[in-house]
Image: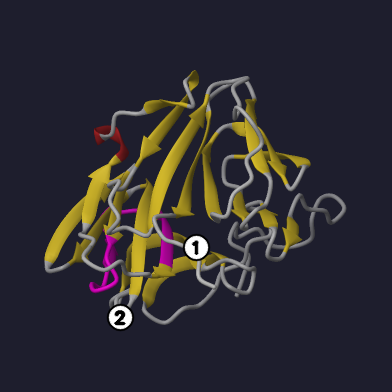
């Protein structure tokens, strides 16, 4: 195990962090301080586990830096576990259901729980991937399929009728899928229309820009490279700050299923 940023030696300032962990409620995890995990089945990869049931999530999120020869040496997911991978930068081969898909920056793949996902770096240098897994909850009469696209193929819509907030819906609106992934992009000064309260959980990775995020009524500065976990019923909302680029993040959402009692 080592630090994901590969910085060694003593810090140049006092030890401090923006990280906040409230298990089962929310977590803000900045890039500095993340450590590398060793997981069987991943070769030539630096992998970090972000969210897990130990944090209170019903899913597991990973951040993977794939080296020049980085790959999975065995299938990921399957056996009741659905998976999703998004290419932050680089070029990656994804194989599922006997078909190979080549994904560049902004490319993503959803793999149903009946199929294993295999990844291989095709970049000639490092590629970075956001990876997700969750136990699938079936719905009688519905069967999900493999989905592989690029964000450039998706026409965004105005979020909640706000023309400076763009919403990208990555998976089909179909009861076969018990989760979805979205990207929200806020222009400088844009925000949610209200502070949300809902049963769904989120795991969010910030792709660009800077923002202020309300997590359980705590306003916190966030930026590119940060990770946020939002548990069920955790208050949440954001607005964009910064000067150079829009504030955007990719996030998961459980959906299309009733709650168990």
Quarter assignment of residue 143: bottom left
Quarter assignment of residue 192: top right
The residue depicted at 48 percent of the width and 35 percent of the height is: 184
Q: Which residue is mark 2?
A: 79
Residue 61 among magenta residues: no
Q: Quadrant of the C terminus?
A: bottom right
The residue positioned farthest toward the top in the image shown: 163
The residue depicted at 15 percent of the width and 60 percent of the height is: 100
Q: Position of residue 35 (x, y in %)?
A: 62, 66
Q: Which residues are magenta?
A: 111-133
123 shown above or below 4? above
197 shown above or below 232? above
Neighbours of disc 1 within 10 Å: few (<14), some (14-19), many (20+) = many
Q: Nearer the viewer, residue 71 or 173?
A: 173
Report whether residue 127 is seen: no
Dot 1 or dot 2, earlier in sequence: 1
Report whether residue 57 is seen: yes
The residue depicted at 50 percent of the width and 19 percent of the height is: 164
Neighbours of disc 2 within 10 Å: few (<14), some (14-19), many (20+) = few
Quarter assignment of residue 236: top right
Q: Which residue is mark 1?
A: 61
């Amino acid at each position: 195990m080592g630090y994901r940023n590969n910085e060694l030696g003593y810090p140049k300032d006092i030890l401090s962090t923006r990280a906040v962990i409230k298990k089962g409620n929310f977590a803000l995890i900045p890039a500095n301080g993340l450590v590398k995990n060793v997981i069987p089945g991943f070769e030539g990869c630096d992998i970090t586990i972000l969210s897990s049931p130990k944090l209170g999530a019903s899913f597991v999120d990973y951040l993977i830096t794939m080296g020049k020869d980085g790959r999975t040496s065995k299938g990921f997911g399957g056996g009741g576990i659905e998976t999703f991978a998004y290419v932050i930068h680089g070029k990656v081969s994804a194989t599922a259901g006997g078909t190979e898909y080549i994904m560049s920056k902004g490319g993503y793949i959803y793999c149903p729980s009946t199929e294993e996902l295999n990844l291989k770096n095709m970049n000639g240098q490092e590629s970075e991937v956001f990876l997700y897994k969750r136990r699938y909850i079936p719905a009688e009469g519905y069967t999900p399929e493999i989905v592989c696209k690029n964000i450039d193929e998706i026409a965004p819509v105005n979020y909640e009728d706000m023309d400076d907030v763009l919403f990208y819906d990555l998976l089909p609106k179909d009861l076969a899928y018990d989760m979805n992934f979205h990207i929200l992009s806020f222009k400088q000064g844009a925000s949610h229309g209200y502070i949300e309260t809902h049963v769904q959980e989120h795991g969010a990775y910030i792709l660009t820009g800077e923002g202020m995020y309300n997590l359980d009524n705590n306003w916190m500065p966030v930026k590119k490279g940060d990770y946020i976990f939002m548990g069920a019923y955790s208050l949440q909302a954001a607005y964009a700050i910064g000067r150079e680029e829009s504030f955007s993040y990719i996030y998961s959402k459980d959906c299309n299923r009733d709650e168990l009692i």
